[in-house]
Image (spheres, rainbow, N blue to C red):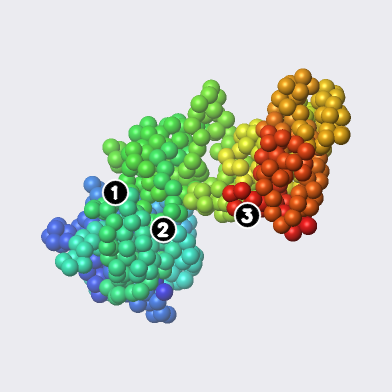
């Protein structure tokens, strides 16, 4: 198993020399770095731990103008080895690097006081005590400390044992998590294509995987970790990924992502650790992983703010990042992302109300609380926002807060009853009308809410299951019944229907109530007379024509044509050819 530790500390305090003493490897990679004696780009080296496993060092730069690179090295890793030189003591950049670690909430680390061979024991102890006092006031708290010399090797064995203890105390990574690999280096290998490197903090990457990058998809054609080829690499690990396809260029500060599992955000609500929100400059730089993006800061509460990013980033609730003021060379605040899909402020007082909401959030992603706040949300979107799923979907991929769901069900019942009261002749509420009345985004939610209610022809019925015919419609229906009593298949014509006041809407209501049988436009019979007609037709022999059916039923072509089509649709009759029909087994 691999553990990853970042170095931190002032320029030229011996970090790279110490890493070389621990690993036997040279972390300074570039010719300029070696010429100037500075770690400008991120350097990597590793060693085997006495108890098994490997320890990889991200050797970050200490040069003042390259602190952004240091942030890229510290951000993705869970632990730090803080280095202070015994012959120089605590320096300004020591303070800035410690502020970065504190802003990021790093909780695992140790102190290495280097160059003890160049300072007396008393001086080295004074430097250690001062450094420990600074460190203990941050998120790191109390840490182990070691007096060492990278040049002579003195104390290195004790430091190595301390690093093993540190590694053993680190939390186990989630190797099943979605991949977000922040790219810190990009280069091209002839014949192999693009290779990117980064620290994999969570998840697993496998050869053959497709990862989203820069708006496209790239296939993983090869993987290396600590210069060894692998079929798969799980967190936490330093990894080099050989990519095939995807965007033409992938840059430092971008991320390789599990496809369709991440949302990008350019407006986020955050909690601050550090300066009060109202004292922050309005323009700062947001650092997460290897990304460094200018942001506009809008204070909300004392320790909450809304950040507008100049370019969108793949973010989730619970992410820890920091804000840096490059002009003043300081980190005024660390941030915890609270919401990657905040509602825009569209009315007076919305910002104050939002500040009150954010004040109640803990910063730990709470799926039940987020669902309660939103009421309804798709499962995939909740996961992509960084929240655990608190319950099973109510319909399809939709999750619903139980309280909100109960309220919606009650509102649906009220809407159904109100519709029936307003139109007793047509009491069924159409599903789409129900969706609009409840403001629901998906018809499937209406179907789930109406569980237990009566559905018929896409309509929802409450207590009034059948239409209640108004008195004038009942009188008209009774007149039709009298007309058809002696000649059941001589349906009233349009003039008679108009005389009775039976409009198409009234006819539809009477048909739904079971008072009339509608077999075609403007053609009504009595309920059950279709089955009665089929019995008569069954006595005509094996087959019959339209003309034979019309005579047997004692009606006209105006009625016979739609009636026979109705009998075909209901399965009483079936066509033999263009002229003849037969009765089915259902009729016989």
N-terminal label among 1 and 3: 1
Q: Is residue 564 above or below residue 202?
A: above
Secondary structure found at label 2:
loop
Q: Is residue 381 left or right of residue 204?
A: right
Give the image location of residue 314, x and y in percent: 40, 49
Determine the secondary structure under disc 3.
Answer: loop
Q: Which mark is residue 68?
A: 1
Residue ID at (37%, 39%): 309
Task: Answer few, some or many: residues within 10 Å of disc 1's Cα (few below 14, many 20 plus, some between 14 and 19).
Answer: many
Residue 231 to residue 326: above or below: below
Nearer to us: label 2 or label 3: 3
SS at circle 1? helix
Q: Is residue 487 left or right of residue 6?
A: right
Up-down relation of residue 333 to residue 131 (above or below): above
Residue that label 2 marks: 258
Give the mark nearest the N terminus, 2 or 3: 2
| Residue 155 point in image, percent of width and height | 33, 73
Q: Are marks 2 and 3 in contact (CB under 8 Å)?
A: no
Q: Residue at x 20, y 57 (%)?
A: 38
């Amino acid at each position: 198993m691999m553990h990853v530790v970042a170095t931190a500390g002032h320029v030229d305090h011996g970090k790279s020399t110490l890493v070389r003493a621990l690993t036997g490897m040279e972390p300074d990679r570039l010719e300029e770095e070696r010429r100037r004696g500075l770690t400008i780009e991120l350097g990597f080296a590793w060693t085997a731990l006495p108890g098994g496993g490997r320890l990889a060092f991200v050797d970050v730069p200490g040069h003042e103008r390259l602190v952004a690179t240091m942030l890229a090295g510290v951000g993705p890793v869970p632990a730090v080895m803080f280095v202070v030189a015994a012959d120089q003591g605590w320096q300004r950049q020591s303070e800035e690097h410690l502020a970065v670690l504190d802003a990021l909430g790093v909780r695992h680390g140790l102190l290495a006081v280097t160059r003890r061979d160049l300072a007396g024991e008393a001086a080295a102890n004074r430097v250690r005590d001062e450094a420990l006092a600074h460190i203990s006031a941050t998120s790191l708290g109390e840490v182990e400390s070691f007096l060492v010399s990278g040049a002579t090797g003195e104390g290195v064995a004790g430091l190595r044992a301390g690093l093993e203890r540190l590694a053993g105390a680190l939390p186990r990574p989630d190797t099943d998590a979605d991949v977000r690999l922040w790219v810190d280096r990009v280069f091209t290998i002839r014949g192999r294509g693009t290779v990117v490197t980064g620290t994999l903090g969570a998840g697993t990457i496998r050869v053959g995987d497709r990862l989203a990058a820069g708006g496209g998809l790239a296939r993983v054609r090869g993987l290396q970790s600590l210069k060894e080829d692998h079929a798969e690499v799980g967190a936490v690990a330093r990894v080099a990924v050989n990519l095939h396809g995807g965007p033409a260029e992938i840059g430092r500060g971008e991320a390789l992502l599990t496809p369709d599992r991440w949302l990008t955000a350019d407006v986020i609500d955050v909690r601050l650790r550090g300066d009060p929100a109202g004292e922050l400059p309005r323009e700062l730089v947001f650092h997460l992983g290897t990304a460094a993006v200018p942001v506009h800061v809008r204070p909300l509460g004392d320790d909450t703010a809304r950040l507008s990013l100049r370019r969108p980033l793949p973010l989730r609730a619970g992410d820890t990042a920091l804000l840096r003021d490059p002009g003043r060379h300081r980190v005024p605040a660390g941030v915890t992302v609270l919401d990657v899909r905040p509602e825009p402020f569209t009315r007076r007082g919305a910002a104050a109300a939002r500040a009150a909401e954010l004040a109640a959030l803990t910063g730990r992603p709470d799926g039940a609380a987020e669902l309660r706040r939103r009421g309804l949300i798709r499962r995939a979107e909740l996961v992509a926002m960084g929240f655990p799923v608190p319950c099973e979907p109510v319909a399809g991929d939709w999750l619903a807060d139980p309280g909100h769901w109960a309220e919606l069900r009650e509102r649906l019942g009220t809407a159904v009853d109100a519709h029936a009261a307003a139109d007793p002749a047509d009491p069924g509420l159409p599903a789409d009308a129900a969706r609009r009345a409840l403001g629901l985004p998906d018809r499937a939610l209406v179907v789930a809410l109406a569980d237990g209610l009566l559905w018929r022809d896409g309509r929802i019925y409450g207590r009034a299951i059948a239409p209640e015919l108004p008195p004038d419609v009942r009188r008209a229906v009774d007149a039709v019944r009298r007309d058809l009593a002696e000649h059941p298949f001589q349906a009233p014509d349009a003039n008679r229907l108009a005389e009775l006041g039976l409009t198409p809407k009234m006819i539809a209501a009477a048909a739904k109530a079971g008072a009339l049988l509608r077999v075609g436009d403007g053609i009504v019979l009595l309920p059950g007379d279709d089955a009665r007609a089929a019995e008569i037709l069954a006595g005509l022999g094996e087959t019959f024509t339209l003309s034979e059916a019309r005579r047997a039923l004692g009606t006209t072509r105006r009625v016979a044509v739609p009636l026979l089509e109705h009998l075909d649709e209901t399965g009483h009759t079936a066509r033999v050819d263009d002229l003849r029909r037969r009765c089915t087994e259902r009729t016989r």
